[in-house]
Amino acid sequence: MRSPKLGIALTAVALSLAGGSAAALSAAPARAATGDASVTIVHGIPNTPVDVYANGKEILPDFTFKTVTSPLSLPAGSYTIDVRKAGSSASSTPILTATEQVPAGANVTIVADLTAAGKPALTPFVNDTSAVGDGKGRLVVRHTAAAPAVDVYAGSAKVIGGLTNGQQQALTVPAGTVSAKITLAGQTAAVLGPVNVPVTAGMGTVVYAIGSASGHTLTAVTQQYPLGGMPLAAQAGSGGLGADPTTPGWPFAVAAVTGLILALTGAMALVRRRWTC
Amino acid sequence: MLGTLWGRRWPAAALVAGIVLAGGAAAGCAATRPPRHDYGTIPAAGTLPVRHASHVASAGKTTNAGAAISVTAVPVRVAIPALGVDAPVVPVGVAADGTLGIPARPSVVGWWAGGSSPGRSSGATVLVGHVDSAAAGPGALFRLPAIRPGEVVTVTAASRSWRYVVQAVRAYPKATLPAARVFGQQVAPRLVIVTCGGPFDAATGHYLDNIVVWAVPAR
């Protein structure tokens, strides 16, 4: 595990706003021209177990605060997401509902979260799957909590300033563990963390600030998703222990030549003897 | 007496010894040639299920379209009983230079999270593991080059085991790895395991070959 000097190593690469509308998703850069989309759902509403429906079918029963799903694989298309109180009937009025256009190959996360004012909402984010350099990963911080603007620290260095509800910011960092801390903007006392966030090479690691500051339920959950397109190569060994034998051929050549000379000498002597006998 | 006998017979003895020596040398030389790693038949692309996205795209009122949604069974462990392999699995991605990521710890196997996963109706589930590392010695897949068609690989994902039967083993020089054939997703469900092997280049610290294993779901 490396502990990178983040103050130097971190490079801010993007700052984007994510609106709570389907329009944000339609701008998704497709990972591939064809293929299923990947959708991850995050529960960021405290004390509210829910059932999640997609196009009328229950896909996540009894989905609870702080849960991050495994990626859902689904064909491109339009999806109506309904969120109902856990255990209520499928025909009851949803707490939240949204229709999202999911493009082929897109990688998307939908967060059931709280607005800055503490109201439940569904916030979609497009996960940037563009590749980063070898040995590096993308660290993304998303503010999806009922809290004012925050600063994000990696170790003792402030790496993101003034992030507000619904916003995200991405950094490219060397693989390793980042000790992350979130403070209210302009302050130094942590409202969240420090938490150790493992950053894996070739992966995006998303940290979601969820919950409510006033309700004392602020916490963080993480999601990982793959970066890059189709692999071209794999380097999977550096020790040489498993190498094929590379015994030099010359001892065998010497033995073979010696054997041939010996056999020829013997044969000639036999022949000559026959002649002289 | 003995001397006379030897004097008469040395040519015959030399002939026999020479033939044995030369033959042995040829056999010995052949035995040290690298294994060909050309076993079995790589599975054909197969028939892919047709997915009609339009069926789920109609006005958001469609019922039952959620059936097309599947939760990814994220692999957490891989075992190859015949080789004594049993290792944890973590997701990996792809770097900007196209190199498939690999877990920092050689005892851990990577699952390409951009590919397929066990239980999906199509695509290649790709695992990548260290054969070894200079710092830590043998890796999780050190013995993989010894795998042969017919042997079983089990992948643990979503709290259950998925069994695959090995169909083919190949070695490719890294420079000519057929990436589309190894990593391509427009195929019937399969498991692909990639590691390094073949000759080792001490100067670069890399193996020259990739060993690729193809397996299909056990029936």
Image (spheres, helix red, strand yellow):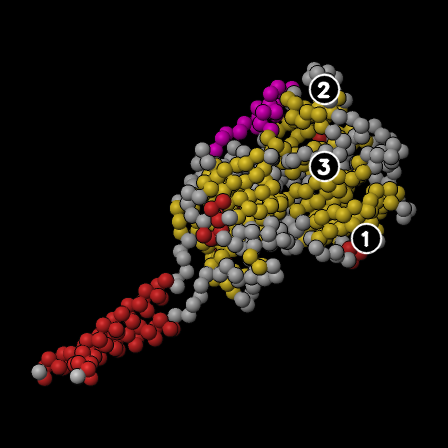
Instruction: Report helix, strand or loop for mark 2.
Output: loop
Q: Are marks 3 and 1 in contact (CB under 8 Å)?
A: no
Q: Residue at x 82, y 34 (%)?
A: A211
Alpha carbon separation for disc pair 2 and 3: 27 Å
**Where are the magenta residues, as a range?**
B48-69
Mark 3, Cα crowd under 10 Å, few <14 / some 14-19 / many 20+, is many
Residue type at mark 2 is Gly
Query: Does residue A200 appear in this view?
Result: yes
Quadrant where the image shows the N terminus of chain A: bottom right
Q: In the current view of this chain or complex, which residue is farthest to the left?
A: A277
Residue type at mark 1 is Gly
Residue where numbered disc 1 is placed: A155
Residue where numbered disc 2 is placed: A87
Q: Are marks 1 and 2 in contact (CB under 8 Å)?
A: no
Q: Residue at x 59, y 30 (%)?
A: B70
Residue type at mark 3 is Phe
Query: Is residue B63 one of those drawn in magenta?
Result: yes
